[in-house]
Amino acid sequence: MILFAVGLGLVLLAGALGWALARHPSAADRVFMWGAIAGCGVALVPAISALAGLTDASAGADVAASATGGLAFGIDALSAWFLVVVLGAGAGIVAFGVPYLGSDSRQRRVRVAHLLLSVLLAALAGVVTARSIVAFLACWEVMALAAYFLVIFDYEKREVWGAGMVYLVLTHVSTLALIGMFAACAPGGVGSRFEDLRQAAAAGWVPTGLVLTLALIGFGIKAGAVPFHFWLPGAHAAAPSHVSALLSGIMLKVGIYGLLRMLALLGAPPVWWGWVVLFIGLASSVLGVLWALGQHDLKRLLAYHSVENIGIILLGVGLGALGVAYHQPAVAWLGVTGALLHALNHALFKSLLFLGAGSVARETGTREIDRLGGLARRMPRTALAFLIGSIAIVGLPPLNGFVSEWVIFRALLGTGSAGGSLRVAAAMAVGLALTGGLALACFSKLYGVVFLGRERDASLERAGTADAALAAPQVFLAACCVAIAVAPWFVISAAARTARIVVPDVSAVPVGGAPLAGASWLTALSVALLAVVLALMGARRLALRGRARRSSPTWNCAYPATTARMQYTASSYADPLLVGFGALSGVRKVRAAGSVHTEPMELVLDRLARPFWNRLLRAAARLRPLQSGGMRWYVVYAILCLLGLLLYLRFVALS
Amino acid sequence: MLRAILGLFAILLVAPIVPGIANRVKSALTGRRGAPVLQLYADLWKLWRKGVVYSPTTSIVFRLGPAVLAATTVLATCLLPLDGATSLVGFTGDLVAFAGLLALGRFMLVLAALDTGSSFEGMGASREVTIAAFAEPALILCFTVLAMATGRLQLQDMLGPPLAQAWLAAAPSLLLGAASLFVLSLAEACRVPVDDPLTHLELTMIHEVMVLDHSGPDLALVLYAGALKMTLFGSLIVRVLVASVAVPAPVALVLLLGGLALYGALVGTVESGMARLRMNRVPQILVAASAIAGFGLILLLK
């Protein structure tokens, strides 16, 4: 625990120094960046040792714990797993954020942003290690507020301010739900430790259904699950890119952590709760990717993909809950392991993609997909990293996204042989497959339109000057994705061990049904794939030896005057699919003389949340007359209130 | 192991014949002579010895596309139990890898098409991913039927001896699954009624228009991967149906090859009997394929 505290202290100190040294920006940048990265590294040591099984974390016991007053912190395997997510991806994000904001002319604001970034990282680490209610809620609130101030970095812009406000409201609804949740399960007040909670649950004092429903609302908002996702696209698009990466890659995962932590504390959940989580997961994954398909803004598109990936993770969580509730440890183990793996993988490849989007936006000055094109030639490193991230996020073999989707698919299909009503869950594999198919469409569109083909705008000719500095963190994250693809064994075994905190009894699971079964074949598959591709490339080169290799413009049906604007765009590419989904796709076609374009809408925000909010305001206006401003009326209210309380005491409380 | 390798080579070798049979049967049924059954071998050999033309717009992605497409299709073949008992590579959940490998090949081919910057190839790519988005759930649904009928999650068992027993208990579901796979295979192999391999107008093409700019060995790889993919889906269907009778492995391989010839003939017959569907009808036929498999699944759930 001391190492962990030192590490976090270092991160905070780096942030404070970076702020204090405002007179020497370049020195401050360097101090902040290397200090924060070093702090993350130091704090990772106890986490990794807990995951590697060097210290006994098998029974969910904390490897390291400390407590002062009501504040208690500890690291068990579950905390350690999410610490790796927070600090590992966090280090990459810090390394990108410093050069990304380095050329910003508003240096004072940049200093504050760096300080807030370190506070946010520390708060995130605090949330996943908190062991008492007050510690958890305190870190949670610091996290929410630090994230808010980072989101409104460009607060002069109207849409940024609006997106920040939606986020601020939603995050407090989330906090409120969590306070309610803890109030419902902790008779000992806010000072209660999680351990007291566990004992209360074991003794049957906790209304599990109510607590888990509130948890689903509170953590679901934070995770961005449908239908609570509508704060997410706006906030992610408004924030600076490295902050978007942090929000999407890391902060959403804290919601997942919360759900898993509550499951671990409360024991077997009610069956209906598992099904609800499973359906929310299914809806989030399919709708998230469908809505992503219609986007024109690079970062909004990626943000909707976060909704999709949270959905995939929730599928795993739901299967875990159902498996525990139906006494099917094999399904539960695979489900939770898959959820943990996908949480880590998503943190890696989504951070990578947001950083890539940041590079593109910085270099070209636009996030409009339809104005980009041909960037692979100008920003080769970013393009390569982005390609790796794209293949990973679509869940294609051999990269890490496939590893976790493979585990979740096994859990889904494994329900088929479980018997009972749980078997119905097997049919949901079709939803995950649809998600994969749509994600393929979406990322082929994104990568194809942004990085391949010809430049759609003459201004792109100048792009690509600062590719190298911004690309280093992306290459690091891409390397992590590849490493997991080549050696999934280590990661799966660590995740499987961690999952046992939520699914304690896995002794009945046969070896062939354990998460690790077949993992070494994945390595073989990735190596074989690489070998065959290289062999075919070699054969092709041999075949071409001595043959003509000509360069000639792309075949355009013998039409000579083609321009870059004739290429397929993001809108036209996605159109056939979106038409197929009708109104659900949330895209409106706007036709004018000689032109047609599509406008994506946020269906939940525009059609549900805003009308609801407006109606609420109108209803509240009816209460206006009560607020007359006359002092006598307020005296009357006070007396009435007092009377009411006295009557309550007399007839209810003391009878 | 040895048998599995033999089976793999047999399939890799005969793959170009399957579309040849389909085309020949189609020609015969429409009163033409048509190209020889072995035509594709000649085409591949010719293309392999030609030079290449690259557009200056293209990048490394364009050159990588065909190689990845062919490699993933070959690796997907390794996952099938071609002799009816063992596959070269098999592990629990490998059905996901099967679908994933084919998807990776498609992803890279689509990117290669977009790399040319041509609006025609963009159109082909857009149509291809549209069809794929509906084909992927259908494939997984068919696999789910097989997995639930056999209680296994490994293609080697889902299409091997356990399937023979499953036929006794769940024949209707498996028949529905096979029917769904057949419709799906027409989409995956780019045949009528989803796509027309013999079309000559760019605006009506799907798969062909994506590879307009590929030439020489690159085009040979794409054509070969296409034939192999058709053979793969044919093998899936034949395995599901043939598994209803338990036979020793060498016989199973012979049955598979015979079944593939029949499959080719069936595809040709379907093609001669109907025209290509309108583009916006294509997702509907794939949803119908999913629905067929879905009925099979419901029968299993009862």
Image: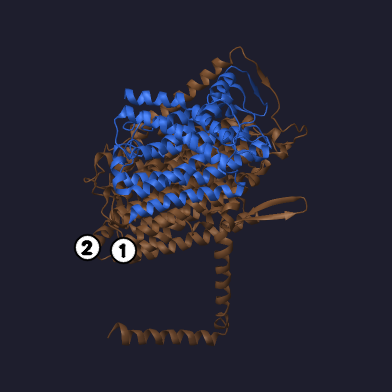
Q: Which color scheme does this rendered protein use?
A: by chain
Q: Are marks 2 and 1 in contact (CB under 8 Å)?
A: no
**Element under disc 2:** loop
Q: Is residue B225 left or right of residue B8?
A: right
Q: Amino acid at mark 2?
A: Ala
Q: Is residue A231 visible?
A: yes
Shown in brown, the chain is A
Q: Which image quadrant for residue A199?
A: bottom left
Colour seen for chain B: blue
Q: In the rendered picture of this protein, how many numbered marks are placed on residues?
A: 2
Q: Are marks 2 and 1 on the same chain?
A: yes
Mark 2 belongs to chain: A
Q: Which residue is mark 2?
A: A203
Quarter in which the C terminus of chain A is drawn: bottom left
The label on residue B49 is none
Q: Name the spot of residue A581 as percent of width and height, x first.
A: 56, 54
**Element under disc 1:** helix
Q: Which image quadrant for residue A363?
A: top right
In this rendering, the label closer to the viewer, 2 or 1:
1
Q: Name the spot of residue A391 as percent of width and height, x first.
A: 50, 37
**In-front residue for pair A333/A436:** A436
Q: Which residue is mark 1?
A: A208
Q: Amino acid at mark 1?
A: Thr
- Tell me the residue at 49%/46% (across/down): A246
Could you classify mark 2 by the number of other residues whose Cα lies within 10 Å: few (under 14), some (14-19), or many (20 or more)? few
Q: Up-down: is A311 above or below A480? A: below
Identify the mark nearer the N-term, 2 or 1. 2
Mark 1 belongs to chain: A
Q: Up-down: is B57 above or below A318? A: above
**In-front residue for pair A613/A72:** A613
Q: Is residue A77 visible?
A: no
Q: Name the spot of residue B261 as percent of width and height, x first.
A: 45, 31
